[in-house]
């Protein structure tokens, strides 16, 4: 189906004719091309009251299209200097990726220097604001709801890693990038966006030096980006969902630990469940303990000791006993980008390059399981 190409058809310049041809080409792939004017009226001239936030990619507005559909309109910052053709190619790739746990890209606007993305609007904002944010926007969530959010997010990430074509490493899994629909089902946003920016200006790489709490150590320190960096960030996210506390905004205990350090300390002191959000008054202890252990496996210092997302989904969704004797201290990347002082971290540094170019074989699922106990068996990969 070809959608109307607002604003692109009336101009005579050669480049715009080419834009139009490309726009129609992409229109045939079910991506809507919006005129700048139509997005201006959808947001009441990008009125500040419609601004729902802003991140490294640019500012996001809530908008209402002429047919009444609510949308989220993301105006990419000036750093996105990609040419029209390359931009459209990436947009086509992103919009072809569809899954119930991924935010759907509806269309885009590429007039003049404007590069704007139009997404489905998610009523309940993000995990960051609903669960970790200020009181006003807070939504109380019991354990089944939190477990469903963990599992749904894991399924979305599994789809990006294994089924999307091409496979996608998200790079920026965090609470503000997991949005919640009217039924509080999670949907991962912002996948594929890093490609819209030239490498040296991706907001993610500029953040490598600054973000506390989400970045896998090998990515923060060595810039090594693999699916396992997403697995690490996902592990941090599970801990946030269970504890109701933000990894990037809070420090824990007298030692001002980051969230994963705190979880590890509680495990050593055999009081792992102290991490559970006091708001969650009733919960199945075995299941919650399993989720926390999955998070600790995900945040292991050495990337090859972390599970794949397929294994994560299995461990979260089945009643298995995990072999937490396999766990070692989690890896950390702190403010300065430096590692924690433990030996695991420094050994990682030495193994650096080799692990990206010649990754060790995936660890079998049975490694994560306690085979001594009476368990539901998972077939090893
Ligand atoms: N489709 C959407 N529906 C509803 N709210 C959205 C949507 N997309 C983004 N938002 C909200 O807009 C705000 C800004 O999002 P944005 O992605 O620009 O920044 P961020 O997620 O904080 O950081 P980053 O740039 O690293 O992704 C967030 O609070 C997010 O919850
Ligand atoms: Mg975002």
Image: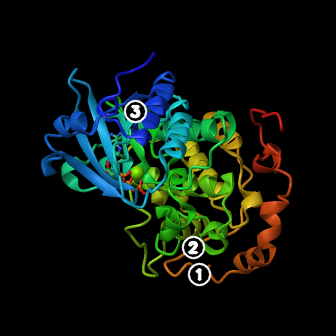
Is 172 placed left or right of 122 in the picture? right
Residue appearing at x 53%, y 70% in the figure: 208
Query: On the image, numbered disc 1 is attached to which residue?
Result: 338
Camera-side residue: 351 or 42?
42
Placement of the C terminus among the 4 image quadrants: top right
Which residue matches tag 3?
107
Question: Does residue 371 show up?
Answer: no
Left or right: 322, with 196 as reference point = right
- Respond yes or no on whether mark 3 lies under 8 Å from ligand 1: no
Looking at the image, tell me whether mark 1 or mark 2 is earlier in sequence order. Answer: 2
x, y percentage for residue 151? 54, 37
Image quadrant of residue 105? top left
The answer to which quarter of the image holds residue 155 is top right
Q: Does the residue labelled 2 lie within 8 Å of ligand 1?
A: no
Give 299 or 207, whichever is nearer the viewer.
207
**Residue positioned 77% across, 72% down in the render:** 352
Q: In which quarter of the image is the N terminus?
A: top left
* Mark 1 and mark 2: Cα distance apart in space: 6 Å
* Residue 141 can be seen, yes or no: yes
Mark 3 element type = strand
Foreground mark, 3 or 2, reads: 3
**How would you rate the neighbour count of disc 2 (Cα within 10 Å): few for under 14, some for 14-19, many for 20 or more?**
many
Return the x and y of residue 311 as percentages of the image width and height.
71, 42
Could you say where residue 127 lies in the image, as x and y percent from the top left? 38, 47
Q: Are marks 1 and 2 in contact (CB under 8 Å)?
A: yes
> How far apart in space, not on screen, are marks 3 and 1 (Cα)?
40 Å
Q: Looking at the image, which residue is at 51% across and 75% down? A: 209
The disc placed on residue 333 is 2
- Asked if 376 appears above or below 201 in the picture, the reply is above
């Amino acid at each position: 189906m070809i959608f109307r190409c607002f604003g692109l058809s009336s101009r005579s310049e050669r480049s715009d004719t080419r834009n139009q041809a490309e726009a129609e080409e992409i229109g045939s792939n079910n991506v809507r091309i919006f005129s700048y004017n139509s997005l201006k009226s959808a947001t009441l001239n990008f009125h500040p009251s419609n601004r729902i936030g802003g991140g490294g990619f640019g500012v996001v507005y809530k908008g209402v299209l002429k047919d009444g559909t609510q949308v989220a309109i993301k105006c990419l910052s000036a750093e996105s200097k990609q040419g029209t053709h390359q931009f459209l190619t990436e947009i086509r790739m992103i919009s072809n990726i569809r899954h119930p746990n991924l935010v759907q890209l509806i269309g885009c606007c590429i007039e003049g220097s404007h590069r704007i993305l139009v997404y489905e609007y998610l009523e309940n904002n993000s995990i960051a604001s609903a669960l970790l944010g200020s009181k006003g926007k807070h939504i109380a969530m019991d354990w089944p709801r939190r477990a469903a959010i963990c599992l749904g997010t894991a399924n979305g990430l599994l789809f990006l890693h294994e089924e999307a074509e091409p496979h996608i490493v998200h790079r920026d899994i965090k609470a503000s990038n997991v949005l919640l629909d009217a039924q509080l089902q999670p949907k991962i946003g912002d996948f594929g966006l890093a490609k819209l920016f030239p490498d040296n200006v991706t907001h993610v790489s500029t953040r490598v030096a600054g973000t506390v709490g989400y970045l896998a150590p090998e990515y923060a320190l060595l810039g090594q980006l693999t699916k396992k960096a997403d697995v690490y960030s996902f592990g941090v996210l599970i801990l946030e969902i269970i504890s109701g506390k933000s990894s990037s905004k809070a420090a824990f205990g007298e030692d001002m630990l980051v969230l994963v350090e705190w979880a590890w300390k509680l495990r050593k002191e055999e009081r792992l469940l102290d991490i559970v959000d006091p708001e969650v008054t009733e919960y199945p202890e075995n299941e919650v303990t399993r989720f926390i252990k999955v998070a600790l496996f995900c945040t292991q210092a050495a990337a090859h000791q972390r599970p794949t997302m397929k294994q994560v989904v299995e461990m979260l969704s089945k009643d298995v006993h995990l072999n937490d004797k396999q766990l070692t201290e989690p890896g950390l990347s702190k403010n300065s980008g430096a590692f924690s002082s433990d030996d695991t971290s420094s050994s990682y540094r030495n193994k650096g390059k080799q692990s990206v170019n010649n990754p060790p074989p995936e660890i079998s699922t049975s490694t994560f399981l306690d085979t001594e106990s009476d368990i539901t068996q998972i077939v090893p990969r």
